[in-house]
Amino acid sequence: MSRESRQAALHRALLARAGEPVLFGDLVREVWGDEPPVRPLPALRNLVRRLRQSVGDEIVTDASGYRLVVRRPGPAQLPADLPDFVGRERELAALAGSDARVLAITGPPGVGKTALAVRLAHRIRDRFPDGQLHVNLRGFATGPPVTPEQVLGRFLRALGVAPENVPLDLGEQVALYRETLRGRRVLVLLDNAVEPGPLVPDVEGCTAIVTSRNALRADEVRLDVLTGGEAARLLDRLGVAGSPHERADLIGLCAHLPLALRIAAAHLADRYLPDYLAELRGGGRLDALEIEGDAAVRATFELSHRTLPERARELFGLLGQVPGPDFGVEAASALLGEDAHGPLDQLVAASLVHRAGTRHSLHDLLREYAQGLGAPVTARLDEYYLLNADAAARSLNPELHRLPVPALPADLPAHDLSDMPGALAWFEAERANVVAAVLSAGARPIAWQLTDAMRACFLHHTGNVIDWFTTVRAGLAAARALGDVGAEAAMSGSLGLAHWRSGQFAEALPEYRRAVELTRQRDDPEALKSFLGNLGIIHWELGDLAEAAEAMRASLAIEPSPNALYNLSCVLLDLGPLDLAVHYAEEALRVSTELGLTAGIVFCLRGLAVTHLFTGRFDLVAEYQDRVAATATAELGPVFFARGTETQAFLRLEQGRLDEAEALARRTVELAVECADDMVEVDGRITLGMVLEQQGRAEEAVEQHDQALAISRKSAFARGEVQSLTCLAADHRALGDLALSLRCATEADERAERGQLRVRQVQVAGELALTYQALGDREEAERQRLRAVELALATGRRGVGATVARLGLAQPPANGGSTSS
């Protein structure tokens, strides 16, 4: 066997028992079989040493063997290193040899701070096997800087934190950031920082590289311009020929600044150096040799700009109006009013615009220079963003109520956003730019128009909830400043939706109440219908079912819609009666079918399947599930399919197929965690715990139900609280802790009573009956049993749960039960 084969065998043996010590003898047998080497332990040590050099995982030596610690995949966000980087060896050596947690690189604009930081990061990246993070903070750009909340949100997601678990409060973000980094070795590159503040990890094993024009209190290297020799080597790398005197002249006129030298080199590809030098000296340019400002760079920019074709010059001036970090050719075309491919290619060739794939950007100094050229301010870029954001939103959610979009120029570039993948891809590419456009808009209608158009995109792209909050608050401020009541209502509703999507139901409630109040002031029935429906959903999540039903019925009274009908059926699934829930779901299905709303049809089918789990009509559950499987498409998203898996798990539980139910419930939890949906995770863990309890694994069931309860309480998710507590009562009763069982069941009953979760209360009362019976209190047990029977008859509940079955309520009436009213 070759050395590589033995190394692979060793890695497989360790990986098979990752996290556990594997005995020396076992490893020798796995690697060498029946023919071990003469000195097996030294041979094994040598093999382990080589394996450590070839894998990213950590191999720990224990007293009796080796243990493999699998490293989680880490982010790799470093920009590409410059192939023609020269000099700075003294600075690189000093920074690379430092053990400080913050390595600061400071200096004037254009001096090469970013290039040095990237070179340093690549030089030391092997010390940080858990990943590298990078952000351009744009602290010295004229547009809005990137906020710490935005950066930390991106960093936390890159580090594996589920999007829904990223907090909105900066202090909580910082705490989670440092906790997530603890025990990891991660490199953080913070470019163009005014003050890095909370973005510095301040965690043992992690290092931050920070670039800034400002002096920082850190292990700092302040860059000066290139030496003559370094500048000459850079010209060599850039292919600039000429006599020593001419080259020295060029270096001096560019003030030894790397950025200026690179731009000059781009213009010398097909030009005669003496002619270029004459242009550079002309027009009083000799004062450009000052280093304290950016005069030398400005002189070089000016010369580069002057030699461009007319349309390229015009486009460059307009690009100063791009608010975000980058742009595509379509955005450039919107600004120019015609196809910008040619002019943009000319700007890239002149090194005035940087191209990375299909995206383009301007260095901060170039952006400032472009803005100073005095190009007429145009709304076309904002209109381009609005046109396509609205198209993406309509593709993602055609039924969503939205503000009217004003008339837009017919010649704006329009992307093909007719399907969900295309819409989401455009949103992800342009999200940072649209956020920056909203923040730059101030008190102008485009602030709320863009925010409203992006709402459906944010709703589907849950990882960007911080950007959602950032834009909607800016849009709300603009609406209030201009006194636009309709826009203010829309922004309050969007803020409520952002809170709902974040699992912050209590925070969502006042926003929707405000949206309803404002909409009633201006007599807008279409908007009022939407806000009342959403207000009902929030009341439902909070467990205020009577208010939820009232709000949804008020929405239906304005105009019936499949959304409102479906949502009311969901409320009645908890409030009862279940035959009425079936009626509204069937009506929503009928209307969705007539309108050809595929997503609406599938949601209604799934809702009917879930409802019939409670009516005990398991034949109908299976039938509706089959119809869902035949109709659903991938565009419905992972959350939908996770919920479908949970429904299948519940059905298998009711059918007594416990092994299948366990596998499906575990898969539900996995899917919920992957798509960061707390409510689906709660339902999945509740189902999994119920399966485990029926398998006689009550301690494992407690673990699942405790986790479900913790998530539910964090989100004020009433149904999850009631169901988790009820199941915990059953678990503890099975374990013989009747006092704790009674406390859990009593708390579940009180919570269900407050929220009028009458369908759920059937199981709660049944669990109380069984617990009192186990305690020997036959009178109270019989009272609770009769109460459970009364609730079951009133609500129509027959299925779901062993408790209901043990009360004799698991079978529907002989006539099959009502399915409509």
Image (spheres, rainbow, N blue to C red):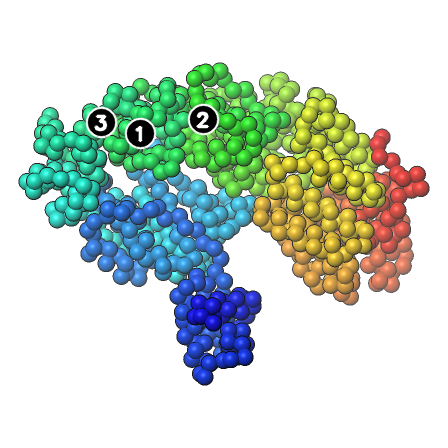
Secondary structure of the residue carrying numbered label 3: helix
Secondary structure of the residue carrying numbered label 1: helix
**At which x and y percent is residue 473?**
48, 32
Question: Residue drawn at (79%, 39%), measured in percent from left and top?
Answer: 623
What residue type is disc 2 on?
Tyr
Answer whether residue 359 is visible to the viewer in this image. yes
Residue located beneath label 2 in the image: 385
Residue extending farthest to the left is 245
Dot placed on the residue nearer the N-terminal end, 3 or 2: 3
Q: Residues within 10 Å of mark 2 (few under 14, many from 20)?
A: many
Please state if 206 lies on the left or on the right of 496 as rendered.
left
Secondary structure of the residue carrying numbered label 2: helix
Quadrant that contains the C terminus: top right
Question: Residue drawn at (67%, 60%), measured in percent from left and top?
Answer: 703
What residue type is disc 3 on?
His
Question: Residue drawn at (73%, 59%), measured in percent from left and top?
Answer: 692
Residue located beneath label 3 in the image: 305
Compared to residue 51, the image places residue 242 above or below, namely above
Mark-to-mark CA distance, 3 and 2: 27 Å
Residue 345 numbered tag: 1
Q: Nearer the viewer, mark 1 or mark 2?
A: 1
Please state if 30 lies on the left or on the right of 234 as rendered.
right
What residue type is disc 1 on?
Asp
Q: Nearer the viewer, mark 3 or mark 2?
A: 3
Along the line of sight, the residue nearer the viewer: 753 or 38: 38
Residue extending farthest to the front is 1
Answer whether residue 787 is visible to the viewer in this image. no
